[in-house]
Image (cartoon, rainbow, N blue to C red):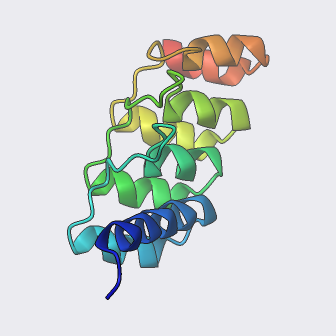
Amino acid sequence: MSDPDEAARDLAARLFDLARAGETGTLTGYLDEGVSATLTNDAGDTLLMLAAYHGHAGTVAALLAHGADPNQANDKGQTPLAGAVFKGSDEIVRALLKAGADPAAGFPSAVETARMFGRTEFLQLFEA
């Protein structure tokens, strides 16, 4: 007989891999079946954080549509928006802002990240 805890850990690892890889269709299937869009890993990273950081706009949109929190920070205080700013992903930054992401949330915040890396286009967007 298989260990249910091990099976749950394996599934969670698969879900985080799907978010990192931008496997939107497969991940959405799990979300449609009831997997929480706010699931976190052992570092506090959400599926949304991983999808945003790795530049998968379609996956970000799907997670937001399934109730992912655009302001949920990981254990280090980093938010999906700050990760998207760091990576320079305009489409993801705009999607997160539209979903209610707060540019001042987290540490470093998206505003601080934009300043650190000279991403003035994002600073202008935050002020709009």
Q: Spot the residue most to the right.
A: 118
Q: Residue at left 48%, top 27%?
A: 75
Residue drawn at x 27%, y 64% is 35
Residue at the image position 64 percent from the left and 52 percent from the top:
55
For the point 44% across and 38% down, which residue is it? 96
Work out whether residue 69 or residue 14 is closer to the camera in this orientation and state it: 14
Q: Residue furthest bottom?
A: 1
Count of marks placed on residues:
0
Q: Quadrant of the N terminus?
A: bottom left
Could you say where residue 123 lies in the image, as x and y percent from the top left? 62, 15
User: Of all residues shown, which one is farthest toward the front?
Assistant: 1
Where residue 32 appears, x then y in whole percent? 24, 72
| Quarter where residue 113 is shown | top right
Can you give x and y, in whole percent of width and height, for residue 36 in the image?
26, 56
Q: Is residue 61 above or below residue 69?
A: below
Residue furthest left as drawn: 34
Front in this rendered view, residue 54 or 128:
54
Q: Position of residue 50 (x, y in %)?
A: 55, 49
Q: Quadrant of residue 31?
A: bottom left
